[in-house]
Amino acid sequence: MNLRPSIRAGGAALLLVAGSAAADQLHVAAWSTLDISAANLTSIGDLAYEPDAEKLWISDGAHSGQVYRINPLTGAVLGQLSPSAIAGLSEGPDALAVLSAVSAGALIVLSSLGESEGGRVTQSGALLNNYGTSNGATGATFFAGTLWIVAGTTLGGGASLHRMNSVTGAILTTVQILGTTSRMVDVDFDPNTGACYMLEEATNNLVEIDLATGLRLSTTSLAPYLIQGNTLAGGIAFDTHGEFLYVGTGTGAAANTIIRLQRDFETSICDGTDPLFPCPCGNPGAPGAGCASSVNPNGAVMHSVGVPDIADDTLVVRALGIPVTAPVLFFQGTTPTATGPTVLGDGLICVSGSIIRLGTKIASGGVATYPGPADPALHVRGAIPAGGGTRYYQGWYRNASNFCTSATFNFTNAIQVRWTP
């Protein structure tokens, strides 16, 4: 079984005026790369995602750099503009943000590479507002209609997060980033949880920041995804629902490529590797999988794909590594089993509380998926309340071969999924 590698970091729900509360972990894994060589960049200044049009924007960090609109699936260049309408802005934009729904396609462009200029332009490059300063921005983003920048232009000088008036450029509130003297080179908010993430230039880390205190909540290395040993000076951008994270890796040949990381919305809460809750017969599977079976010594894996958003639910759950045509009962619970995973059949049952049997599917090639084309959306079948909530999913599959116990069934691991409204 090929268990996908993941990077895990904490999440936090955004409170724009007060602070943030704990949320689920962020999981990303390599998905694809975008060839943007047609833009002929020498360095990537920043990334920004346009949610309404589902387009990616990239600024050239070189002298007199342009701004490009990119197809986020193929990397094809769809258009470009010059930010030169902002008086004095001649260096490559080091910070870029886009908001089309409220500001008629307006872009925020700021430069802090040897100058301090910034302003708001249309998507055709016409000037809307000249800020007269970049406020030291090294990255920018819109979230919930609000403009945020991260500032800190010298290595060793630390960084701060500013909430800004997008029309005048005035700073409204400031959060000093604590516990580091490293420069943060970009900022973006996870649209699913509201967590605030920054890129730490000296370490290539994705750092989650508490908006109330400025303390880091988690640190995740993105170094495994870098191209040719480059740095993350090029920035990050989540797509509309936080399903994908785009990463720009900086200068030279690496400026020809954007890395696209897929987001997983699950946390594995139960497998057969915990010595306190062992599989029966000494048949543990691989980490993150269920107990071993007669057809798979690694055990079967429960995995999700899509977004657990009640307003735009695309989530499906999958059981992988089961017998080729075995029936699988997918079920949902409101809690994990109270005293820990419990031996049942050849595996462990991990889900409890209010149980809903979602449906039974016949595997094809050892993979079964719920919901199918004729089934209701998962949040409908699972009766998820309008306000969202946390639910737990597991698969119970038939395995009649003589293997461990006299039972004829086994289980996948279990996963936790946090639903948002």
Image: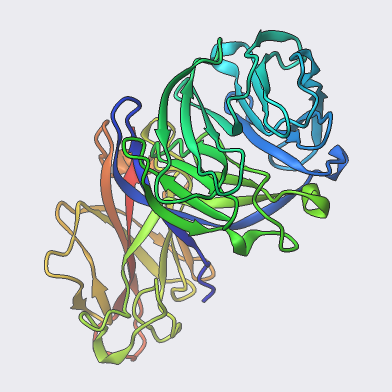
Q: Against 400, is 88 above or below?
A: above
Residue 326: image quadrant is: bottom left
Point out residue 143 in the picture as x, y percentages from the top left corner. 48, 27
Image point 40% across, 33% down: which residue? 175
Q: Is residue 46 visible?
A: yes
Which of the two residues, 78 or 11, is positioned nearer the viewer here? 11
- Give the quadrant of the C terminus: top left
Residue 397 in the image, given as x and y percentages of width and height: 34, 70
Q: Residue at x 40, y 51 (%)?
A: 179
**Residue 109 percent location from the top left of the image:** 67, 23
Q: Give me the residue at 31% from left, 57% from top.
A: 393
Task: Left or right? Give the position of 377 relative to 253.
Answer: left
In this view of the protein, can residue 420 be seen by the observer? no
Position of residue 355 in the picture relative to residue 147 (left or right): left
Residue occupying the point 36% across, 87% down: 401
Q: Is residue 26 above or below residue 311?
A: below
